Image: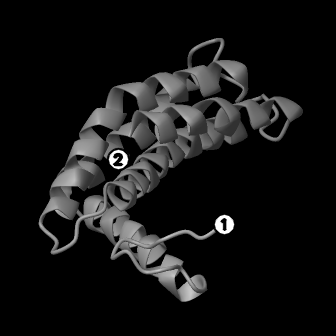
Amino acid sequence: MVSRCRRGRVVRGRHDIGGFVSRSVEIAIALLLRRTFRAGAALLLLSGLAAGSLPLLEAPGWELGQAGSLLAALLAPFAGLAAFRIERGRADPSPAAAAAGGALALLALLGAFAGGALLRAALGPCAVLSPALGFVPLLALPSALLGT
């Protein structure tokens, strides 16, 4: 099977695909350096810390994963549109690179939320590392990827 890169040439190796990956990482870094994303990360970190006071969110597990997936569904349009605006200004825009960059930025925001909840659980009486912790990325990751 022959695949073609964005200029119509045949993909011959990893260096052709590396441009897509580095472009999406550049978009994610540009998004995370914005003041609104930094403020959102701080707000999500604080809300993750405060979420530990709720009875079901004390121990990281299914409920925290559901909260993360709801946050991803709410924040994904904003991250996706901001990434597409950054990518639209380039000479040869790639919608896939914009979607991947937006998803990476959104995953960083969700990581701040989950990190705050894990920090709160570490300070409380509940066990931080349990088998239920695997539900957090299992539920939040698809919502972030599909949402952007």
* Vertical arrangement, residue 44 with respect to residue 53, above or below: below
Q: Quarter of the image holding residue 136?
A: top right
Location of mark 1 (residue): 1
Q: CA distance from mark 2 to mark 1?
A: 46 Å
Report the residue that reaches farthest toward the front. Answer: 1
* Crowd around label 1: few <14 · some 14–19 · many ≥20 (10 Å): few
Q: Quarter of the image holding residue 132?
A: top right
- The location of residue 54, given as percent across then percent down, is 57, 15
**Which quadrant would the C terminus be assigned to in this image?**
top left
Mark toward the start of the polypeptide (2 vs 1): 1
Q: Which residue is pictured at 71% across the width and 41% down the height? A: 122
* Vertical arrangement, residue 6 with respect to residue 50, above or below: below
| Label 1 SS | loop
**Which quadrant would the N terminus be assigned to in this image?**
bottom right
Task: Name which residue type carries label 1.
Answer: Met
- The location of residue 71, given as percent across then percent down, is 43, 28
| Label 2 SS | helix
